Image: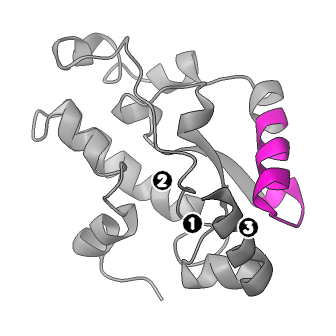
Amino acid sequence: MIRTFSTVMILCGTLTCAATGLASDLPPDSVPGAINPAVTQDNLQSTVCVPNWTSTVRPPVSYTNKLKAQQMKDLGLTGEPRAWEEDHRVPLACGGNPTSPQNLYPQSWDGPYGAHVKDVLEALEHRKLCKGEITLAQCQAVFLAPNDWRKNYDAVYGQRK
């Protein structure tokens, strides 16, 4: 699985893949997502729905930068590390595991579906979760396979070009 992702990156080039959505804006298969066991449907108002809660569980940059460097190497991603965000597949605001390598991957900042775009969808799903419009499981499912978060984004905001 990782080999396929690396091959795509080498064939497409980092910016091209980010622009076409072939790889860099979606997590590789080696990052299936992981859930924070401390977050449950019953404790949303004392965990993810508390203002600035994600800052209390976000791993330190020293951890994520080291993991990002290793993952970039493993995945054959090129360019400056600062061009990539070490992103949580299941967002912290939806009860994603903060430190599991199965929930963290390098996502390009650039491209029509770069990290900033995913952040918009994450914020929307978080608001719906905390208003009780969706369940925790529904919030997490938006970002877990087989779902493609880009399709969820497009359904709400229209397709990016």
Q: In percent of the image, x 31 and y 71: which residue is there?
A: 151
In the current view of this chain or complex, which residue is farthest to the bottom?
Answer: 161
Residue type pointed to by label 2: Asp
Whether 70 is drawn above or below 60: the answer is below
Q: Secondary structure at mark 1?
A: loop
Give the residues in magenta.
66-83
Q: Are marks 1 and 2 in contact (CB under 8 Å)?
A: no
* Residue picked out by circle 2: 119
**What mark, if any, has residue 6 been given in the picture?**
3
Q: Position of residue 21 (x, y in %)?
A: 54, 77
Residue type pointed to by label 3: Ser
Q: Secondary structure at mark 2?
A: helix
Image quarter for residue 132? Answer: top left
* Residue picked out by circle 1: 25
Is 82 one of the magenta-colored residues?
yes
Image quarter for residue 23? Answer: bottom right
Cα–Cα gap, marks 3 and 2 = 25 Å
Helix, strand or loop: magenta stretch: helix
64 horizontally vs 73: left or right: left
Residue type pointed to by label 1: Asp
